[in-house]
Every structure is written in C-alpha cells, then in structure tokens.
Amino acid sequence: MTTHGKPLDSVLETIGETPLVRIHDAPSGVPIYAKLESFNPGASVKDRIGQYMLERMLERGDVSAGGTVIEPTAGNTGIGFAIAAEQLGLDAIFVVPERFSLEKQQLMDALGARVINTPTEDGMDGAIERAHQLADELDDAVVPQQFSNPLNAEAHYATTGPEIYDALEGEVGAIVAGCGTAGTLMGIASYAREQNPETYVAAVEPEGSLYGEFIEEEREEGEYKTEGIGTHNTETNELFDPELVDDIHAVPDRDAHEELRRLAREEGHLVASSSGAASAAAKAVARDIATGEIDVPYDSVVTVFPDSSERYLSKGIYRDFEEWEN
Ligand code: PMP
C-alpha cells in the first residue's frame, strides 16, 4: 500500500492507493472522478496485476522463484510484470505485437525483461500463441494469461474497487472503464455490484472494436488508433461477463483524441488515448444521469485513467488527429 509518510522497503509497496481526482467538465450535480493509475511505479494500471498475479502464482506454486514468466502483452502489462518479476526473483519474457509503442518495449528491456516481437497482422492472438510455444520450450515457465486468468480481475476486486469506495465513502453511482482484457472493469464492477446491485456499469471500447457483440449490439470491425482497449475477437476476452455490464460505449478515435488533449490543456492530466475514451464515455453517462435517462443509487460517476501520454509522445499523441500515428 502506498504511503508517503514513511520510508518503504520496496518499489512494490508503492503500487496502488492512487489518487481519485474530480473531472471538471461534467454536468452540474453529477460529479465525475478519475482514478489516476499513472501514479503507480511503472506508470500504469497494470502494475497492480503484475504484483497481485505473480504473488498469488508463487504462493500457489504455479511457478517457483528462479522460474520464468512469459506474457503476451501490449506493453503496460509487461512493464507491470517486469517490475514485480525482478523483485520476486523471476525472469520475464514478453511477446509484443510490433505495432505497440516503442517506449513501452524500451522500458520492459530496462527492467531486465526480454522482449520478442510478433507481426502486427497476427494481432494479440499471434502473440498469445508464441508465448505458449516459448513456455513449452522452457522448464518452470508460466504464462499468466491476463486475458483469461481470473487473478487479473481479482487484483482489481481486491484493490482498485475498495480504494474507490473508501475514497467516496460508498457513494458511487456508476463505474465507466475501458476494456482491453476487461480485468480492470470486471474486478471493479463485481466489487461495486456487491456494495450496491443497482450500480450502473459501462464498458468502453474504441469504435471499430467488437466488445459490443457481447450484448448483441451491431459493430462494424475496423482499425483504431486508441491503444490498450478494444478487441477484434471476443473469444479472446474470456474475463468479460456481460451480466456485470449495462452498456458498452464505442468511442471514435477522434473523440478520444480531442478529450485527451482537452484533459491536458484544461485539467492538467497528461493521459493517453484509453483515458481520453474513458473520459468521453464517463461524461456521456454523467449527462444521461443528469437528464434522468439512467437511474443510479448515487449521482456520481467513477472512471479509470490507465496510463500517461508520455509513453506515446513518439506517436504524436499531441499532434493533430491525422498526424497521430497508429
Ligand atoms: N488502457 C491501457 C493503456 C492499457 O494498456 C490497458 C491494458 N491493456 C487498458 C487500458 C485496459 O485494461 P484491462 O486490460 O484491465 O481491460
């Protein structure tokens, strides 16, 4: 648990207890709050699962100290796992589709991990397959499989969810969060629905992603620039439980980009595209609460800003929309 009041023994103790900050571009009477996950030591929400999953897997004997953790990852998970792996005495290998940001790959390398690239056109499925091949070739290697391992969502059920409820003294009306693996949203949503079954829950994906198919919504598959959320194949997203979700917002790249630039300019948040999408969707939910279209137990919306824009500067995240690279 993070404390700023006394010296800590390990960087792992600085994971979690991130700030929950008001977003001011909101309808009156419906405050929006964002959990700022870039305050974690690896600067993303994924530090939480790196620590939580590896600690549980070591306890359970899925892998032993001196063994290897291999994960297919878009990047932030690799950084989170790399930090925890080294501190817990494990080697780390990450399989990353080429299109993901170079900054993230450099950080995994700096943290002592090995990075293996797979072709962009093979997508996350290609990375997952390669990770399993590698695990078969090594002794005492484990693939945590963030896309299917319940420990991913459990990390957020155990930490992110309770932190939000403590900060707002339980007065949470709606949870809105982006879905990559859906671990963040599923963990928070299961905690939220236990606190109050009426809590409104909305998932966020980029336009072009297919999460909407989970709730029988029409979706047209397409490319998107928003990084870290969305899916091209819902069979991969084993953690997603449609029962825990009231709606799935598909946010166009253009809206996510406009919002991430506004968040920097007006509110001082240096956050990336998945945060821009989450904020745009959180504002839409807040507007629906304000007009009475959505019923909630409390007039408030909580969202998650998963990481920071600094990781995407080389892709021109703050340039004009057309110049922002995929
Ligand atoms: N935003 C970013 C930048 C991410 O890296 C991720 C993880 N892929 C997410 C959002 C989504 O988090 P989750 O996997 O828990 O759904």
Image: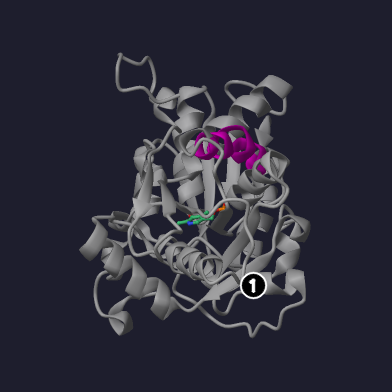
Residue extent of the magenta highlight = 152-165
The reply to whether the magenta stretch includes residue 265 is no
- Horizontal arrangement in the rendering, residue 43 relative to residue 198 (left or right): left
Query: Residue 56's spot in the image, x, y percent?
Result: 65, 26
Whole-percent x and y of residue 145? 67, 46
User: Which residue position holds label 1?
Assistant: 232
Residue 312 placement (x, y as % from top left): 32, 61
Q: Residue 113 occupies which quadrant of the picture?
A: top left
**Secondary structure category for the residue under label 1:** loop
Residue at x 58% of width, y 48% of height: 184
Q: Split into 4 quadrants, where in the image is the N terminus?
A: top left
Q: Residue at x 39, y 61 (%)?
A: 101
Q: Residue at x 36, y 47 (%)?
A: 21
Identify which residue is drawn at 47% across, 62% down. 278
Q: Is mark 1 within 8 Å of ligand 1?
A: no
Q: Is residue 152 visible?
A: yes
Q: Which amino acid, mark 1?
A: His
Work out whether residue 82 or residue 129 is closer to the camera in this orientation and state it.
82
